[in-house]
């Protein structure tokens, strides 16, 4: 079992997220992370889905996704050179004695303090999941009160792009033999 | 361009008419009343069912008999939920149906209004796609797209939920503007020539190939293409339950059904094969048995329109994604004409060994065996334009073994979901679709009692279906599992029923009871001669068993075979 990352362009309509999530649930794929937002194309949203599976499972997940008629394009960007980011807000207990240490840690991890209260701090960190996990680990002894993470988003490096729409000819050229019959 | 003001309800029917729909099966209620009211003004015949599950199976039977989209309609809430089983049945067997449900007014959605249920949520996993329509302006586009989705690619069920206000309100109707356009719409791809060449090379190198012909042969209309490939390469063909009719049973290359209740020589051939050519079948677990020991010597070619089926259950050497007929038309010319006499003879020897165990060898000992009744029915109806619709259980397997189908779409059965109660309504749907055909429902006494209310539909609509109840006083298939795997502890499988003859007569249906073999032929002859619907109560051996059987998950060659020489059943 490995983690596979998909960039999924879907029509921006009610219920589409539910269809995608329901597909993963029904077919027994474990969703590691799922992030959704607008894409560069009006009317299309882009999801970044990280699922736990094997190579065969990844191919089937892609084929199943294409059968959802609101899904426009699915790219498996797992092996590609990509920038991956997660965003977290972490509220941690802080008093006179610990605040300075926490500020130093914040610097080391390239995070930011976005709120200061008498007995807590809120940290914002954007980076790889590993870095966020690292920060979290060192914060735990101080008392993590609350945390929220946005889920992984990913983009290919360089000028390569997960295209939202592909002309029929190019689709055939890219993945000859795979039909997207719904 | 025609632009006229119409209500959502009128647009619904107008679009169905333009999609070629002439028959719908349904049941009215409050939330769908505007649509029913409008129906009177359109040239569509409505068949009033007795339960909405029946409507879905009728639409399904209609679809399977013809390949055209079947349509069912129901009200919101309980009407809609009653459709779930029929949608799931169609989903698992890739059958194209469109189900239309009424929904409470759009402003009431989410308020737990009277008979409000989230039917698009409920049916999400059992439909190919579903829609909630809240504005009349969306009706035309959704209906057009629904028919395209249901019937294209790998077919399947689609549900359209229309709020009451969307049915009542008016808007301009523009058919052309409602043509389906989806950014994500893709048609089946064309496999690359190299893939086909690779597959052809595998076929040409094979000494012991077997073609596995599935439902996709019928869906794709690939009957001739399949036959051409088989004859050119002299390749034996095994069929799945839903692939029956894909090659005439009498064709010398047709081995018969594979799988759990396939004949022993068919499964043996698969286990000994050096190449499997899977054509529009999905390696269901009832077909493969234990995957670890399945066809261990064989390379595998899998042709399927659904990319998600490739390498799902069985790892293949060549996965070709596309429409079967198109693929075969391109593949076959690259296949070398061959004679595989040795291989065919090897299979024929195993076949001879199996024949002595056949239930047909039983002497007439005064008992009535289901296999005999079904085989006699085949004998009498062979050559006629006959459709047999089976329910689920032992009788379904005996039908597959002892009724020999020569043509596609002449057997209609619920394979993937195994839905008891399917046969009678699906037979009604098939009869609607093909009134000129003789339609027989073969059904167990258990399954019959699930949807027998639809006999009233057959009478009211004057649909002359012939119903053969294989009455063994048990939930037979489950009893068989208890016999084999639960030490004959018959928990909840002995089953009583009404006097089916009297019951049928109460519906106004001609009926007869048959309890000896001598009565079988006259009863069938009488049923065939009678113009209206008929019920025959075949009172068969109670503890009879379907042989051979591959226990679920066992190796395909590890069949439980009929004891030989024939051992009599408990009653003797
Ligand atoms: C009591 C019971 C016992 C059973 N025992 C057996 C048994 O012994 N043997 C047996 O075979 N079955 C048995 N079944 C049925 C079994 O469960 C499956 O339903 C059946 O094997 C499925 O057959 P299939 O794969 O051909 O059809 P489907 O499940 O309908 O699959 C069709 C395949 O064809 C593909 N397809 C569709 N259209 C096209 C096209 N145009 N081009 C290419 N591909 C296409 C689809 O994508 C799909 O993969 C039994 C069922 C019951 C209820
Ligand atoms: C709706 C539904 N409920 C339960 C089952 C499980 N089941 C499979 S076969 C069977 C027995 C069928 O009995 P009957 O209709 O009498 O047919 P027979 O096997 O005796 O031919 C049952 C209960 C099913 N397939 N469908």
Image: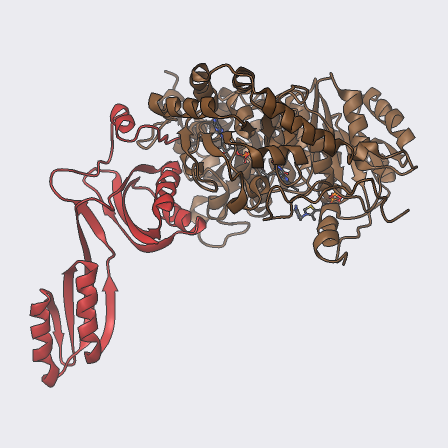
Locate ligand 1 by image quadrant: top right
Q: Specify whether residue A137 is in view.
A: yes
In the rendered image, the vertical position of residue B111 relative to residue A42, given as above or below: below
Residue positioned most to the front? B342
> Relative to B491, is B205 on the left or the right?
left
> Relative to B386, is A13 on the left or the right?
left
In the rendered image, the vertical position of residue B333 relative to residue B164, given as above or below: above
Percent of width and height locating residue A173: 26, 26
Q: Specify whether residue B409 is in view.
A: no
> Which residue is depicted at the point 71% across and 32% down?
B401
The colour chain A appears in is red
In the rendered image, the vertical position of residue A145 relative to residue B308, given as above or below: below
Percent of width and height locating residue B470: 79, 38
Color theme of the render: by chain
Q: Along the line of sight, which residue is nearer the eye, B108 or B555?
A: B555
- Figure quadrant of residue A147: bottom left
The colour chain B appears in is brown
Percent of width and height locating residue B326: 44, 19
Q: Along the line of sight, which residue is nearer the eye, B127 or B198?
A: B198
In the rendered image, the vertical position of residue B431 relative to residue A63, given as above or below: above
Percent of width and height locating residue B141: 40, 29
- Figure quadrant of residue B97: top right
> Which residue is depicted at the point 60% across and 29% down?
B238
> Which residue is depicted at the point 25% across and 56% down?
A151
């Amino acid at each position: 079992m490995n983690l596979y990352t998909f960039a999924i362009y879907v029509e921006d309509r009610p219920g589409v997220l539910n269809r995608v999530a329901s597909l993963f649930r029904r077919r027994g794929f474990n969703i590691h992370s799922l992030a959704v937002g607008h894409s560069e194309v009006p009317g299309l949203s882009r999801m970044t889905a990280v699922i736990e599976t094997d190579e065969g499972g990844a191919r089937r997940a892609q084929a199943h996704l294409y059968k959802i008629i609101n899904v426009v394009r699915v790219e498996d960007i797992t092996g590609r050179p990509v920038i991956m980011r997660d965003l977290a807000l972490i509220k941690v207990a802080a008093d006179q004695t610990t605040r300075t240490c926490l500020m130093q840690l914040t610097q080391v991890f390239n995070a930011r303090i976005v709120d200061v209260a008498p007995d807590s701090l809120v940290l914002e960190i954007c980076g790889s999941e590993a870095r966020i996990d690292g920060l979290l680990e060192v914060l735990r002894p101080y008392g993590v009160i609350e945390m929220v993470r946005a889920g992984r988003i990913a983009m290919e490096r360089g000028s390569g792009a997960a295209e939202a729409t592909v002309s029929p000819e190019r689709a055939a050229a890219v993945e000859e033999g795979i039909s997207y019959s719904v | 361009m025609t632009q006229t003001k119409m209500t959502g309800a009128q647009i619904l029917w107008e679009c169905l008419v333009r999609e070629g729909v002439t028959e719908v099966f349904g049941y009215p209620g409050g939330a769908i009343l505007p649509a029913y009211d409008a129906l009177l003004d359109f040239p569509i015949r409505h068949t009033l069912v007795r339960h909405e599950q029946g409507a879905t199976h009728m639409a399904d039977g209609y679809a399977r008999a013809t390949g055209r989209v079947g349509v069912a309609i129901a009200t919101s809430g309980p009407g809609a939920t009653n459709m779930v089983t029929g949608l799931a049945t169609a989903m698992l067997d890739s059958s194209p149906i469109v189900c239309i449900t009424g929904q409470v007014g759009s402003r009431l959605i989410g308020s737990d209004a009277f008979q409000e249920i989230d039917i698009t949520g409920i049916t999400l996993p059992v439909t190919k796609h579903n829609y909630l329509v809240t504005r009349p302006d969306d009706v035309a586009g959704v209906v057009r797209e629904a028919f395209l989705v249901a019937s294209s690619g790998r077919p399947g069920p689609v549900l359209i939920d229309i709020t009451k206000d969307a049915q009542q309100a008016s808007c301009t109707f523009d058919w052309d503007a409602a043509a389906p356009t989806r950014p994500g719409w893709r048609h089946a791809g064309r496999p690359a020539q190299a893939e086909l060449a690779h597959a052809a090379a595998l076929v040409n190198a094979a000494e012991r190939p077997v073609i596995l012909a599935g439902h996709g042969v019928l869906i794709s209309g690939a009957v001739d293409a399949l036959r051409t490939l088989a004859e050119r390469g002299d390749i034996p063909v095994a069929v799945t339950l839903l692939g029956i009719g894909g090659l005439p049973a009498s064709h010398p290359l047709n081995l018969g059904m594979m799988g759990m209740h396939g004949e022993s020589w068919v499964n043996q051939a698969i286990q000994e094969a050096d190449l499997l050519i899977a054509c529009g079948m999905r390696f269901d677990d009832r077909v493969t048995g234990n995957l670890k020991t399945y066809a261990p010597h064989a390379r595998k070619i899998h042709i399927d329109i659904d990319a998600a089926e490739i390498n799902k259950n069985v790892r293949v050497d060549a996965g070709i994604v596309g429409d079967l007929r198109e693929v075969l038309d391109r593949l076959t010319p690259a296949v070398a004409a061959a004679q595989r006499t040795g291989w065919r003879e090897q299979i024929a020897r195993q076949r001879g060994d199996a024949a002595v165990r056949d239930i047909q060898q039983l002497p007439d000992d005064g008992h009535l065996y289901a296999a005999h009744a079904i085989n006699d029915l085949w004998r009498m109806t062979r050559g006629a334009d006959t459709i047999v619709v089976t329910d689920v259980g032992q009788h379904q397997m005996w039908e597959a073994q002892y009724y020999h189908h020569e043509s596609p779409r002449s057997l209609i059965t619920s394979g993937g979901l195994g839905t008891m109660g399917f046969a009678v309504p699906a037979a009604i749907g098939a009869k609607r679709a093909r009134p000129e055909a003789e339609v027989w429902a073969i059904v167990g006494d258990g399954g019959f009692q699930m949807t027998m209310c639809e006999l009233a539909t057959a009478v009211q609509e004057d649909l002359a279906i012939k119903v053969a109840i294989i009455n063994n006083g048990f939930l037979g298939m489950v009893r068989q599992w208890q016999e084999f795997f639960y030490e004959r502890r018959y928990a909840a499988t002995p089953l009583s029923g009404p006097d089916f003859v009297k019951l049928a007569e109460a519906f106004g249906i001609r009926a007869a009871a048959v309890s000896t073999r001598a009565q079988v032929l006259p009863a069938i002859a009488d049923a065939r001669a009678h113009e209206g619907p008929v019920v025959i109560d075949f009172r068969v051996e109670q503890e009879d068993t379907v042989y051979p059987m591959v226990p679920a998950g066992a190796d395909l060659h590890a069949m439980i075979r009929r004891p030989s020489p024939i051992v009599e059943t408990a009653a003797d």
